[in-house]
Image (cartoon, coloured by chain):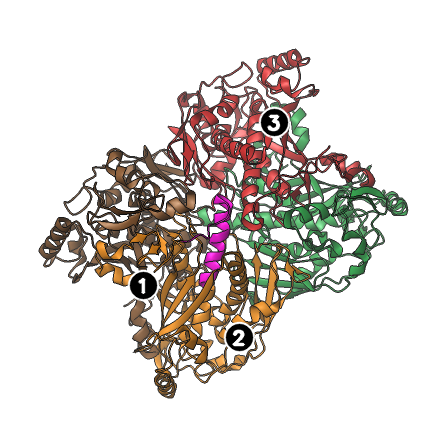
Chain colours: A red, B green, C brown, D orange
């Protein structure tokens, strides 16, 4: 398969460019009989959409989704669900200076090398805007997983540039523009971002995502382990450079007598595994952390070359997120949902319906 | 596809259990005309095999590979290459106590939940022994990539439990049992492992792997990005809990003006990207770091339950690696090679032959 | 993969229902740099569209295609090409009587059994209208194959109901509403169809398709043989019940001394193989014949049951093709083109670029 | 995927050459808990094996299968099942004269063109011997389908060269070397074959296969229809040149009022559909007919060229089936079983468990 389809049984085939007429995806493999309308999908798109605070790109896109197929009288029919989002606020001239040169740290260079041609308007296909169809598709997966197994997803930003963000409560996440599970540090984060924008620079972020009420037994060893597919999904998000599951890098310094999560009749006592053992879900929360690099489109001048190989300096104007990590939380949740959905169907195929009788404590 | 096939165009379909009669794989999609014999594969298996020092499992397996198909008069024919490794040193009675209980931190529990049946002998299918066929298959990929593009792979351990290992020189890697690029700390590492074994405990490790002379343009955005597939491959290795590419988690605290690798006519000035931008290879070295958790089979008693859910205590005897990270370096190199091989063929399919004219400096 | 994606490297993911707002597909894997606009696609859609003679359904659909992505400044970029065709002449009330009963010989019954829900408007997803996106996608494949290898496609109807149609010349195919390579029998065919409509009945047809200037070496034995994939593609067209390649059923009565196509330095002396040996193309014309069953939506009353299992009589009114075979020729050509395109890319992946130096005579 | 894997969820990855050390396959995706041993597989291999009458090749191969993985204490574990069959009666010198020339009608030419290299010993990878692993894998599918849904498979030869074989009773099939459902014509068939061998020539055959007690609802439209996948499977058998389902080519001359199978509360009144409507199983018998071409390896001299393109005459000696159709019945049954197995799992994935409450009469 070419690279624009996610999943093996619940598949999302994504199309579009940042400044084309529309973006969207075809979702195939959705079980029939699921009640579905645009209203089930729009809230997740609204959490991800641009222009909602001064800390993100000022491009104004309502990101309104339309369902063009696969639903009849309010229910999925088991046939492909086409989701389309029409682009509305393209200003391709903003990107004129990018056509002939390559932004350091940007896909400009590699698309050019790979295809010998690229759509430079807004980053074309390489734009993080293309995560919107993924988020829309995942809203369908989330609804099905919730109904079927009670599975839920949540996420938050745990670090913004140099500032670690203390976890206070999940309740705070929708109350600030950063998806921070925190109230006390929000002013600091705002100030940090304001200074960054003033400097014409950008920063990275760390995001945590959690799936709860996960069925036991999802994951297909040897290669298509649940953790392997989660790593694939997360590293596939624009700008992600690292993925941890459970204790992650902390596992390196843990002794076996500490790391291995002990089991009692009431459940596991800890969750260093992050809900996955041997590539298969344990039923505990699945916990994932990702690192997002700073945006490459910045005003600060940087050395580069043009298509002819001549040295040049690149300064990027136009509308960009100074921290793409700010809008990454709903995207990471979406990716996790798509992986679990696909593995739920894979499990049904080989082993019959999944178990929801979980042994959970930690 | 069920979960035991790796890759899309250069595929490895893996079979076997730790204590069954044989393990192996079918490699499909290998280009025809490659000179190939067992002698091309055995050295990589020898680097991974057990029993080579007191710090790894004492199971004695020569891990001798046989090619059963796909090669005629010393050359690949383009048809499937069957690789078989016969198990020789099974002692299934060693594992008798594992049959009814679940080791904390082990796949015992999840295989049981998923399939309702499991082969407990030596961990059955969940054993790290099943990485041997992967390593064998990757030796074929490595040979082809080297001939075709000059691509090479190397790796080393950069941390053992609490001990960070200083990088001194790649030349040291084969000179010690840890795959450490170091001579001065080897005695410390030996002492650390001796103490650990005495305690009946285990530890984690951190491994770095690097691919050099990588063609430009490998990777299939949107979803099947090169970094996404590397993350999948690495997280799919037994016991891996985290994957970083390039600057990894360090990207979070880097400003955009620092992280983005500047480009000059002579090459990139840095390599924070780890050789991948927008999911496509830049031609620079691909750099990956992984975290490996401590072995779950330890002598230290731990709380668990049996199949009936009754509380019990588990102590694992038998032969186990006290640090599975010690033998992980050749496995991580192999995984990286398989990903690049698959993407080289995918690139050829859509874009024709790949570019080897690289812009590399950093 | 769910069932709505065709191909492995040049993939077509199809969506839509007969009476939904739109139908279309995402084409992924197209090589970059191909000049492409709607004008390259529309002619093939026009050959297939309804309402062009009194012998086909009177539904009026311009079947105008729009490209929503994957093309920049008139050239393909290597990213997904989204093709959309908006439905315009839906009259869902025409189908009211079909909602509760099952037409004999129609997918009504099986969709209902499979999914527990179905979109009955115009046959929903099971309508032959869904071949339009396939035809559109194949126009891209045809253009690439023509440019790259000179490959061309043609087809004709060789039997209409009980009337075998003599082959006179390919030049006649566009001159009559039947895609017959014939002028002398057209009046008979018209009369046959007029009588059939008057009777409220329907008939089958036989279609021949040919690909010329096919590269040598396409096809992936063991299972993904070129002939196997052609059979899959052809039998997957609505209403097809049989597929022959080369001599087809005639092979049964041929002796080996007759069937095997002899080879000379100037080329093959015959083409009983239909251009494929051992699942791999020989470079000769690929010749395929398919049988198309009569339309199941007819006015003639027939016994059936309703959803509750009660006996009932079904008479189908509304707009239907009395012979779906009449519009099948461009669809069969399209399917053949998609198979060859996919195998051309598969061949490039494993073996490098294909050979166009063909040994052809017969 | 390269071409040596059959299926999407119940996969068979095939390896080996006619005269290599072994042939076999890895079966992945088998549900866990199925009682399985070699004794379940061997009978199907015995029906297909060579040397059982004077009318087939005299190569002596016991075709003894060994299970090397995936079964523990007599039950499948859900992990890959490796099946190996060691070749025993290779006489590669028999084929010396084939190395430099191409047999008319044989894959010699196309393998050479595709790969630039081929294993000429016994036809190498293109030999019909490679159907043995497929038959072995299908025995597992058959056992599961029988236990789960009561599904059964049978087949017979319905024509040998010019001789149509009257259907008398399924009971006769195992009583003669031709898999004919007939007793009265057996002497004629024997005489026909004796004359053919004396002449150094070969002939084709027609085979019918039937699956009964098929679950309702199998098949994934739009492209992966059940009939499309059956056509793929059947046309993928060595030497097959045509496939019909249900009424097949007869559909062309049937009126809609005749072809469409009427439905009553007691079941369908006819089965022109061959058990499939809209690409989805109806629950009726699935009926398939295939045409098999005459063997290309014959003693009769034929014109050909050698590798250098020089004209030559080819006469093939050695051991060959004068009618490969004679041993094709169990192979066709196996292919049908593999398709149904794969679609049963695909159906479970999307729609949950399949329905066995069938509406069958005809």
Q: Residue at x 41, y 73 (%)?
A: D170
Return the x and y of residue D203 as percentages of the image width and height. Answer: 35, 78
* Residue D280 visible in the current orientation: yes
Spatial CA span between label 3 and label 2: 57 Å
* Residue B354 visible in the current orientation: no
Return the x and y of residue C59 as percentages of the image width and height. Answer: 21, 39
Q: Residue under circle 1?
A: C244
Spatial CA span between label 2 and label 1: 30 Å
Residue under mark 3: which chain is it in? A
Residue under mark 2: which chain is it in? D
The crowd level at tag 2 (other Cα within 10 Å; few <14, some 14-19, many 20+) is some
User: Callout 1: helix, strand or loop?
Assistant: strand
Spatial CA span between label 1 and label 3: 55 Å
Query: What stretch of residues is rendered in magenta?
Result: D335-358
On screen, D41 above or below B219? below
Q: Residue under circle 2?
A: D46
**Label ID, residue B340:** none
| Quadrant placement of the C terminus of chain B | top right
Contact between labelled residues 1 and 2, with CB atoms less than 8 Å apart: no
Query: Quick one: A309 or A356, which is closer to the camera?
Result: A356
Query: Quick one: B22 or A99, which is closer to the camera?
Result: B22
């Amino acid at each position: 398969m070419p690279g624009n389809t996610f999943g093996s049984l619940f598949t999302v085939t994504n199309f579009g460019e940042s400044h084309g007429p529309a973006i969207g995806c075809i979702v195939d493999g959705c079980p029939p009989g699921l009640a579905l309308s645009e209203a089930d999908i729009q809230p997740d798109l609204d959490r991800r959409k641009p222009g909602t605070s001064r800390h993100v790109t000022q491009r104004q896109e309502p990101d309104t989704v339309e369902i063009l197929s696969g639903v009849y009288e309010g229910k999925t029919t088991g046939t492909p669900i086409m989701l389309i989002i029409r682009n509305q606020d393209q200003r391709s001239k903003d990107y004129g200076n990018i056509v002939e040169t390559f932004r350091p740290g940007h896909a400009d260079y590699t698309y050019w090398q790979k295809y010998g041609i690229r759509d430079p308007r807004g980053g074309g296909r390489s734009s993080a805007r293309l995560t919107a169809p993924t988020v829309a598709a995942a809203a369908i997966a989330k609804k099905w997983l919730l109904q079927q197994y009670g599975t839920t997803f949540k996420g938050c930003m745990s670090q913004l540039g140099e500032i670690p963000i203390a976890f206070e409560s999940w309740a705070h996440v929708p109350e600030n523009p950063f998806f921070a599970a925190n109230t006390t540090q929000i002013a600091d984060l705002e100030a940090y971002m304001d200074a960054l924008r003033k400097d014409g620079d950008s920063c990275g972020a760390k995001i945590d995502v959690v799936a709860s009420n996960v069925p036991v037994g999802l994951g297909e060893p040897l290669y298509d382990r649940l953790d392997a597919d989660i790593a694939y999904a997360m590293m596939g998000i624009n700008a992600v450079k690292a993925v941890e599951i459970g204790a992650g890098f902390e596992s390196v310094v843990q002794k076996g007598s500490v790391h291995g999560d002990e089991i009692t009749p009431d459940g596991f006592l800890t969750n260093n595994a992050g809900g996955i053992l041997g590539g298969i879900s344990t039923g505990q929360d699945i916990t994932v952390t990702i690192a997002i690099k700073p945006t490459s489109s910045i005003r600060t001048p940087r050395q580069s070359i043009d298509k002819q190989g001549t040295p040049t300096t690149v300064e990027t104007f136009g509308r960009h997120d100074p921290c793409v990590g700010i809008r990454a939380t709903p995207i990471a949740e979406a990716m996790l949902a798509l992986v679990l959905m696909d593995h739920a169907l894979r499990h049904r195929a080989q082993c019959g319906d999944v178990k929801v009788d979980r042994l959970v404590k930690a």
